[in-house]
Image (cartoon, rainbow, N blue to C red):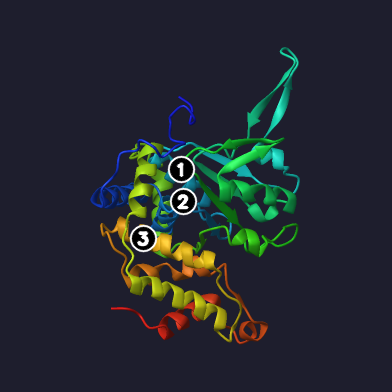
Amino acid sequence: MTLEDSGIGQPGGISPMTLDEVHELSSEIIRECGRAVVGKIDILRDVLIAFLSNGHVVLEGVPGLAKTYMARTFSSILGCAFKRIQLTVDTLPADILGSNVFNQKSGEFWFRKGPVFANLVLADEINRCPPKSQSALLEVMEERQVSIEGVTRKLPRPFLIIATQNPVEQEGTYPLPEAQLDRFMFRLILDYPTGAEEAEVIRRKHVGDATDLRVLTDPSTLVRMQEACKSVFLEEDIISYIRDIIVRTRNDPQILLGGSPRASLVLMNASKTRAAMHGRDYVVPEDVRKLCVQTLNHRLLLKPEAELEGLTVERVIAKILGEVDCPR
């Protein structure tokens, strides 16, 4: 059965899922991922929050930190169609989206789907992709559709892009413009494992990778989880709290470019999803605070003098959270 034939493309007829079920299933997904991926539980949890919030993620880290392995394992446990795109300087938009191919036998054109026609797409080393091909992802990420030669084709639901980039090598790369970075829900920074975690990685590779990972969901179940997360209630004081944080980023003397209204909406949706994953039908201030760095660290630009003083975006966000009144 194809993704289109599965009937997941339309939300109609999807049976509701309770928030208790969302809590139990999301906890089970994280535990199962932990059987294959050493450490990085917080990263996996944030990726799941983005997936259930219908967002996209940038993973940033040096080579060899299991970014590709983590994405493939995550997709396998979720029971989703997975595609990987190795982006290079000569990648064309057609390599990503697909193209019309002429069939000499029938004398007609037929559409060959690109790798974006999957539930989870890994765009590996996105900053090596030329701007023309990077821009091809804009409609895909925002509208969940592909338009080629006047024909629009919907992408399957759910749909998540995990883009990776190497922050060390800058030669021969094309840094993502702010307009495209802003379309990613989270920017997640992967660091080196601890000594104990690295020893566990070696031990597991010596014994052999876990091959008996369970498939815990399917695309239709994930869509039901997404719909359940939308039902989480948001108090007026939480709305004001999110607004105050984002507005403060625009007025802070150390910030050159603050968060846009999209940042407010991303923080709201992510907070609702985090609350659902904890089994709550309401958002608490802790949900908002825990997701501020992931939401804002690629949306804020510091002034040059602040960078010269050694300040980082994370430290400025922490300062803002300490200054904004937190509801009780």
Position of 283 with respect to 159 (left or right) is left
Labels in figure, total: 3
Q: Residue at x 45, y 78 (%)?
A: 244
Q: Position of residue 296 (x, y in %)?
A: 52, 69
Per the model, the C-alpha gap separating discs 3 and 2 is: 12 Å
| Element type at mark 1 | loop
Residue situated furthest top in the rendering: 105
Q: Earlier in the sequence, mark 3 or mark 1?
A: 1
Q: Earlier in the sequence, mark 2 or mark 1?
A: 2
Q: Quadrant of residue 250?
A: bottom right
Q: Residues within 10 Å of mark 2 (few under 14, many from 20)?
A: many
Position of 31 with respect to 38 (left or right) is left
User: Which residue in the protein does label 2 denote?
Assistant: 54
Give, as a three-letter code, the residue at label 2: Asn
| Element type at mark 3 | helix
Give, as a three-letter code, the residue at label 3: Lys
Q: Which mark is residue 272?
A: 3
Pointers 3 and 2 in contact (C-beta within 8 Å): no
Q: Position of residue 289 (x, y in %)?
A: 39, 72
Residue nearest the viewer, comparing 170 with 55: 55
User: Which residue in the protein does label 1 denote?
Assistant: 158
Q: Position of residue 124 (x, y in %)?
A: 60, 49
Q: Residue at x 74, y 22 (%)?
A: 102
| Element type at mark 2 | loop
Q: Earlier in the sequence, mark 3 or mark 2?
A: 2
Pointers 2 and 1 in contact (C-beta within 8 Å): yes
Per the model, the C-alpha gap separating discs 3 and 1 is: 18 Å
Per the model, the C-alpha gap separating discs 2 and 1 is: 7 Å
In this picture, is 117 found above or below 193? above
